[in-house]
Amino acid sequence: KNEVEQSPQNLTAQEGEFITINCSYSVGISALHWLQQHPGGGIVSLFMLSSGKKKHGRLIATINIQEKHSSLHITASHPRDSAVYICAVRIKAAGNKLTFGGGTRVLVKP
Amino acid sequence: DSGVTQTPKHLITATGQRVTLRCSPRSGDLSVYWYQQSLDQGLQFLIQYYNGEERAKGNILERFSAQQFPDLHSELNLSSLELGDSALYFCASSKRLNTDTQYFGPGTRLTVL
C-alpha cells in the first residue's frame, strides 16, 4: 500500500464547477505539499500545510492531521486549471523526505 | 519562472554512458532537492543538500551521485546509464531546511537509448 493515496485519479469538470481532490496518508508527517504539474511538465508548488487551511485565489487547501487527510479545492474552475495535481508529504520518521501521491489529472472543459 | 535553473533541458545518450545534470537554486536558497519522474514510478525524491551538506537521501541508486558546491549550485551525476533511467529530473530549492515551500526548476528530460 502506498503511503500517500490520491483520489480521484482522473477528473473532468465543466468550466465554473467546484472541484475537490483528496489526499490520504498513512504515516506521521511534518508537512503536506500540493503541487501542480502543467501539460508541458513544469511543476509549481501551490501550498505547504502543517495544519488548518490555506487559500490562494480560487484554490483552497485543507488538512486534518488527526484523520491524515487533505483536500485541494478549486472554485469556479477554468480550462487553464487543467493539469496534474500532486500531493506530497514530508515523513517525520524518514528524515523529512518528501513522498508523493500518484497525482490527479484534472481536465476542465470550456 | 521559479528562479531555479536547470541545464540541459534535454539530454539523449546511450546505455552505459555517464551524464551530469546541473541545477542553480533561487538566489538566497540554501537547500537543493533532486527528484526523478518516470512514467511507471511517478515522482520520487532522490537526495537533498543544505548549504553544501547532504541532509536526506531517498531512492537514489548507487550509480547516481550528487553534490552541492560552495556557490550553492548542485550537480546530479548519473553513470552506467540504463534504459530505465530515462525520466524527467527535477531540481527544487528552498530557503531553509524542510520548513519552506520548494520552488521547482523546469526539469531535464533524459532519454537513454
Image (cartoon, rainbow, N blue to C red):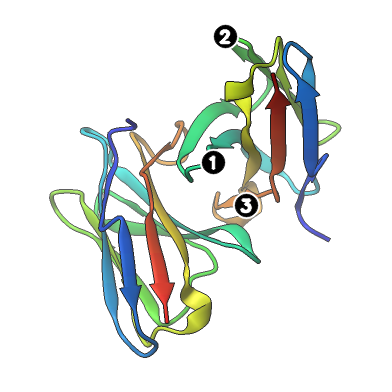
- Which of the labelled discs sits on residue B18, or is there none? none
Spot occupied by residue B57 in the image (x, y as percentages of width and height): 48, 63
In front here: B73 or B42? Answer: B42
Height in image: A22 above or below B75?
Answer: above
- Chain of the residue on which disc 1 is drawn: A
Q: Please name the residue that numbered disc 1 is placed on.
A: A39
Q: Please name the residue that numbered disc 3 is placed on.
A: A99
CA separation, marks 3 and 2?
26 Å
Q: Please name the residue that numbered disc 2 is placed on.
A: A57
Residue at the image point whose x is 45% and y is 41% from the top = A42
- Upstream in sequence: badge 1 or badge 2: 1
- Upstream in sequence: badge 1 or badge 3: 1
CA separation, marks 1 and 2?
21 Å
Q: Which amino acid, mark 2? A: Gly
Spot occupied by residue B84 in the image (x, y as percentages of width and height): 53, 78
Counting other residues with Cα less than 10 Å from the Cα at mark 1, is it few (<14), some (14-19), or many (20 or more)? few
- Chain of the residue on which disc 2 is drawn: A
Q: Which amino acid, mark 1? A: Pro
- Residue A65 visible in the snapshot: no
Of labels 1 and 2, the one closer to you: 1
- Residue A60 visible in the snapshot: yes
Counting other residues with Cα less than 10 Å from the Cα at mark 3, is it few (<14), some (14-19), or many (20 or more)? many
Spot occupied by residue B16 in the image (x, y as percentages of width and height): 36, 90
CA separation, marks 1 and 3?
22 Å
